[in-house]
């Protein structure tokens, strides 16, 4: 993608923040860059007042704090298992989604999804909320919105250990990439959940 003069590509921003991006990089590092891009998109959506979507904080219980040089948490543990990455309100509907990045070029591995995430998204669906996954194929520079209904059924039935890219293309929507927003995922939400009549 070509960026205008003065605009720093997200990959270079990540490198400046010392986030390592390599073919053999950890899932956490890949996820950090992807999440940073989604956070940027959400900031843009908030700025233009299109949606209110936030990154859900990981619930931790602080055990020990070092006050000798400011307040620094030195010991903590996860209070409970986290659910999904993002939630908010869009077009009067509750919206909840998980963002995942993979190095695979052929499929999305199910081991990337925790059982509590599936349970949480199933609850959102039962209460008529909007629930989906954003799946980023890092090496292909492709990102798809895949409805949570599809992934939850696939996860429960487990016909195989991963969802083939061909199935994601068939049941999902390709997300347009840009500068502002970085990922135009709300256009895909409109297309799937608010089809024009």
Image (spheres, grey):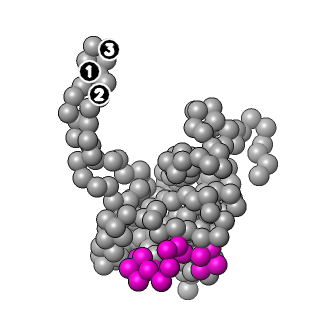
Q: Is residue 161 magenta?
A: yes
| Residue 187 in the figure: left or right of residue 4 | left
- Front residue of 190/65: it is 65
Q: Name the residue at the bottom extreme.
A: 197
Instruction: Give the numbered dot on residue 69.
Output: 3
Specify start and end residues of the magenta stretch as a single range.
152-167
Name above or below for residue 197 compared with residue 68: below
- Of tags 2 and 3, the one toward the viewer is 2
Task: Kindly identify the residue that appears in the image at 41 percent across and 56 percent down.
Answer: 85
Q: Residues within 10 Å of mark 1 (few under 14, many from 20)?
A: few
For marks 3 and 1, give the CA distance. Answer: 7 Å
Q: Tag 1 or tag 2, which sits nearer the N-term?
A: 1
For marks 2 and 3, give the CA distance. Answer: 12 Å
Name the residue that disc number 2 marks. Answer: 74
Residues at marks 3 and 1 touching, judged by CB atoms closer than 8 Å:
yes
Residues at marks 2 and 3 touching, judged by CB atoms closer than 8 Å:
no
- Can residue 197 be seen by looking at this rendering? yes
Name the residue that disc number 1 marks. Answer: 66
| Disc 2 element | strand
Instruction: Provide residue 81's location: percent of width, then percent of height.
Output: 28, 55
For marks 2 and 1, give the CA distance. Answer: 6 Å
């Amino acid at each position: 993608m070509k960026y205008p003069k003065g605009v720093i590509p997200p990959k270079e921003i990540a490198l400046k923040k010392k986030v390592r991006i390599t073919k053999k990089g950890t899932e956490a590092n890949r996820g950090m860059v992807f999440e940073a891009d989604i956070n940027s998109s959400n900031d843009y959506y908030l700025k233009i007042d299109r949606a209110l979507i936030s990154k859900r904080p990981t619930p931790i219980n602080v055990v020990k704090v070092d006050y000798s040089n400011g307040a620094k948490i030195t010991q903590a543990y996860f209070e409970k298992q986290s659910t999904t990455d993002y939630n908010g309100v869009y077009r009067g509907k509750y919206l909840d989604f998980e963002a995942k990045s993979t190095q695979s070029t052929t499929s999305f591995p199910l081991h990337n999804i925790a059982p509590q995430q599936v349970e949480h998204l199933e609850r959102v669906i039962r209460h008529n909320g909007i629930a989906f996954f954003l799946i980023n194929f890092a090496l292909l520079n492709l990102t798809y919105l895949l409805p949570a209904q599809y992934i939850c059924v696939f996860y429960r039935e487990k016909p195989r250990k991963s969802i083939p890219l061909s199935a994601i293309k068939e049941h999902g929507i390709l997300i347009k990439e840009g500068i502002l927003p970085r990922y135009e995922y709300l256009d895909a939400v409109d297309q799937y959940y608010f089809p024009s009549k």
